Image: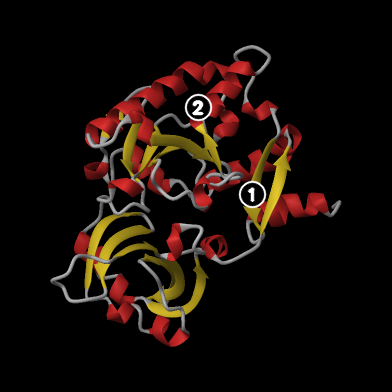
């Protein structure tokens, strides 16, 4: 993790341009807004959470200036996490801030309010369009911050559990968790091996490895948080994921099931294991051989570059 004082100095320099999105009450309880702005003339995205937000332009323009306490939780590459307060420094932090700086046009599209489409990705569409798209994204350096963690250069103080080797993985807090509210617990199980990018790379030969990861993730989590039992946790993966390095989300079952846990986004780990067990074929048979239905934002590259042209017959 970088110098916390340098990271904390970024937020006061944020200059508001516009509101990108206010998450609806069905997701995050209406507690999240996403702001687009600049820091030193470079684009930045600031996500803030609290009980409720007034989204009038006048108040949003002075939102950052009203923050009196900003404490850095972590920083890795372009990603920064904070606890902040909009009141006197004597009260507890009331906001969880995520800052992406400098942000890209792709970040702006992802976090902007947009329509959603359900798409069915056949094995052929995956092979001919989606996998090359994944390859391109990996080659663009989008995973630098992930490699920093895996290779021990950043955020090592946040690593809660680790196993090395071909079946190695590590556990760390999700950037969207405040690190204290157990009922909204969010952890990440990040895989060390680089040959598995997403659930599409899972094969029958990985069943034992997946079961091992599941048990170790559950064991480590209840050891870290003794107030929880294993059946109070759920494990899932996203498709499409935010980044193409296989990782498993570990969350409290008490966490409100918003967009990130919705059908068309989250795939239960136990269900994936069961699907692999029932697939016909040898050890090489896997998730690349089946159709997968999921949701995409209308501003996403995959929708605009792959699925919309296919729908339109182009």
Residue 274 in the image: above or below residue 146 = above
Residue 235 in the image: above or below residue 275 = below
* Res. 295 mark: 1
Choose between 182 and 129: the one closer to the eye. 182
**Which residue is found at the position 59% from the left and 44% from the top?**
263
Is 199 displayed left or right of 245 in the figure?
right
The local crowd at label 2, few if under 14, some if 14 to 19, many if 20 or more residues have their Cα within 10 Å, is some
* Res. 314 mark: none
Q: Which element is circle 2 on?
A: helix
**Which residue is found at the position 35% from the left and 49% from the top?**
184
Q: Which residue is mark 2?
A: 270
Q: In this view, which residue lies farthest toward the bottom?
A: 58
x and y percentages locating residue 295 in the rendered image? 64, 49
Q: Which element is circle 1 on?
A: strand
Q: Nearer the viewer, mark 2 or mark 1?
A: 2
Residue 290 in the image: above or below residue 84 = above
Choose between 307 and 183: the one closer to the eye. 183
Residue 127 is at least partly visible in this image: yes
Choose between 35 and 6: the one closer to the eye. 35
């Amino acid at each position: 993790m970088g110098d916390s004082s340098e990271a904390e100095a970024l937020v006061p320099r944020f200059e508001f341009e516009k509101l990108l999105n206010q998450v609806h009450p069905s997701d995050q309880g209406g507690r999240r807004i996403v702001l687009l702005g600049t820091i030193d003339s470079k684009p930045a995205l600031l996500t803030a959470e609290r009980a409720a937000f007034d989204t009038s332009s006048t108040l949003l323009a002075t939102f950052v200036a009203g923050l009196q306490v900003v404490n850095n939780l972590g920083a890795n590459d372009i990603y920064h996490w904070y606890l902040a307060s909009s009141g006197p420094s004597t009260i507890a932090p009331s906001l969880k801030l995520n800052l992406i700086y400098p942000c890209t046009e792709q970040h702006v599209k992802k976090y902007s309010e947009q329509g959603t489409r359900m798409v069915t990705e056949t094995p052929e569409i995956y092979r001919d369009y989606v996998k090359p798209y994944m390859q391109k994204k990996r080659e663009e350096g989008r995973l630098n911050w992930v490699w920093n963690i895996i290779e021990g250069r950043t955020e090592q103080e946040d690593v809660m559990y680790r196993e090395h080797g071909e079946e190695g993985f590590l556990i760390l807090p999700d950037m969207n968790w405040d690190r204290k509210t157990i009922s909204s617990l969010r952890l990440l199980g990040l895989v060390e091996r680089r040959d598995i990018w997403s659930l599409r790379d899972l094969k029958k030969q990985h069943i034992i490895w997946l079961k091992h990861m599941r048990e170790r993730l559950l064991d480590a989590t209840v050891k870290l948080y003794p107030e929880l039992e294993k059946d109070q946790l759920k494990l899932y993966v996203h498709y499409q994921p935010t980044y193409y390095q296989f990782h498993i989300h570990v969350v409290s079952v008490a966490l409100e099931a918003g967009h990130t846990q919705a059908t068309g986004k989250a795939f239960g780990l136990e269900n994936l294991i069961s699907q692999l067990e029932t697939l016909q074929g040898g050890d090489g048979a896997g998730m690349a051989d089946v159709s997968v239905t999921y949701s995409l934002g209308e501003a996403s590259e995959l929708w605009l570059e792959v699925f919309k042209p296919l729908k339109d017959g182009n």
